[in-house]
Amino acid sequence: MALRVVILDRDGVINRDRDDYVKSADEWIPEAGAIEAIARLKAAGIWVGIATNQSGLARGLFSTADLDAMHQKLRHLVREQGHEVDAIAHCFHLPDAKCPCRKPEPGLLAQLQTLYGRPFVSHETCMVGDTQKDLLAAAAFGLPAILVRTGKGAKTLESHAIKNPVFDSLKHWVDSLAL
Ligand SMILES: [Mg+2]
Ligand SMILES: [Zn+2]
């Protein structure tokens, strides 16, 4: 498989998740090896987009400026490895807003595809998530996905019958690719 596009969930995949939401750049702490894994994907010529539910914005737990600061930190850390994240799409709605973007809806993937500029091809694309919402969003958009055990991943495996491939972390998945 020639992998061309990777869509990453953020919390629990790239950075450590928190039960009380990741609310600031200080609370945004990378998972072990995640930044290097993104850099390795980029070095292999893969387009890397991030699709993240951020209902904490609508809940008033943090501001758009806080979110920007978190994403500046993410981008800065990847840039230190000599690479750039291609796009970040976030949903700021509450779950009961019934918006088209909050995963498990596929709207964030549609936004990323627009930024990519071409249709995502299923056998050249993979989503990486730690919750069933991520896996369902990918499926709703016709894309394969893998689950990582970091973040809520272990809990997801306990509470859902997951048929997707499972890896210990983003780093372990990228290690497994023949890049
Ligand atoms: Mg997550
Ligand atoms: Zn939304």
Image: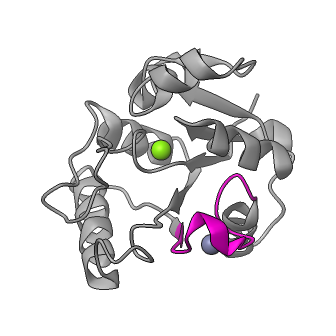
Q: Residue at x 72, y 17 (%)?
A: 161
Q: Quadrant of residue 132?
A: top right
Q: Quadrant of residue 18?
A: top left
Q: Residue at x 27, y 70 (%)?
A: 72
Q: Where's residue 128, x and y in %? A: 58, 38
Q: What is the chief secondary structure element of the magenta stretch?
A: loop
Placement of 60 over or under 127, stated as above or below:
below
Q: Residue at x 75, y 71 (%)?
A: 100
Q: Which residues are magenta?
A: 89-105
Q: Is residue 178 visible?
A: no
Image check: 26 left or right of 132?
left
Judged left or right of residue 127, residue 59 is left
In the rendered image, residue 137, in percent from the top left (x then y), is placed at 73, 49
Residue plotted at (60% across, 64% down) = 95
Front in this rendered view, residue 47 or 33 = 33
* Ligand 2 lies in quarter: bottom right
Residue 103 sits inside the magenta stretch: yes
Magenta stretch holds residue 98: yes
Residue positioned most to the front: 96
